[in-house]
Image (cartoon, helix red, strand yellow):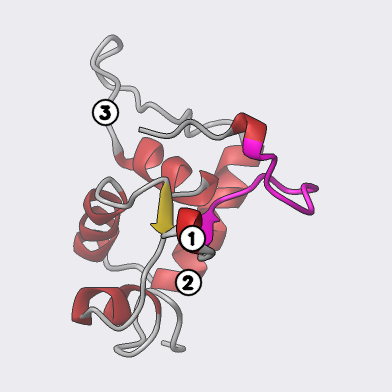
């Protein structure tokens, strides 16, 4: 299997587990979680509909990166749920904010951020 963000011990998942990298939650992670999560209101279904071609194609890209290990899929989906939506590197002190932005946005609109 080729090395990817999911399997490389020094980048991505491996680096984050070791503390040498950081990540934020984005739509790809949310999609993977929903694909693997049962829908509590519709037994037998998942939160991300499996029969929609667009969803299947997106999930196929995930599988291409992580391979066919079902246990790794569940481990990653569970781990995705622990990711923050943003990382604050002391913005008030001249640092930076790292957050996922939607495709097509060249900058983060600070008016859309919610500080907690």
User: In the image, is residue 47 part of the stretch drawn in magenta?
Assistant: no
Which percent across, then down, holds residue 86? 44, 50
Q: Is residue 30 left or right of residue 55?
A: left
Q: Is residue 75 left or right of residue 24?
A: left
Q: Secondary structure at mark 1?
A: helix
**Main secondary structure type of the part rendered in magenta:** loop
Residue at 23% over, 78% down: 19
Say whether disc 3 or disc 2 marks the residue closer to the N-terminus.
3
User: Which mark, by number, is residue 35?
Assistant: none
Q: CA distance from mark 3 to mark 1?
A: 18 Å
Q: Quadrant of residue 17?
A: bottom left
Residue under numbered circle 3: 38
Q: Is residue 71 something that shows in the picture?
A: yes
| Mark 2 surroundings within 10 Å by alpha-carbon count, few (fewer than 14), some (14 through 19), many (20 or more) | some
Relative to 115, is 32 above or below? Answer: below
Whether residues under marks 3 and 1 lie with C-beta atoms below 8 angstroms apart, the answer is: no
Say whether disc 3 or disc 1 marks the residue closer to the N-terminus.
3
């Amino acid at each position: 299997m080729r090395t990817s963000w999911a399997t490389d011990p020094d980048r991505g998942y491996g680096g984050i587990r070791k503390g040498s990298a950081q990540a934020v939650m984005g739509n790809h992670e949310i999609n993977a979680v929903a694909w693997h999560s049962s829908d509590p209101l519709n037994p037998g279904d998942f939160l991300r509909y499996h029969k929609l071609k667009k969803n299947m194609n997106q999930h196929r890209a995930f599988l291409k990166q992580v391979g066919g290990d079902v246990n790794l899929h569940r481990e990653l989906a569970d781990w995705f749920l622990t990711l923050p939506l943003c990382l604050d590197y002391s913005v008030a002190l001249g640092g930076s904010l790292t957050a996922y932005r939607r495709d097509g946005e060249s900058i983060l609109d600070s008016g859309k951020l919610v500080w907690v």
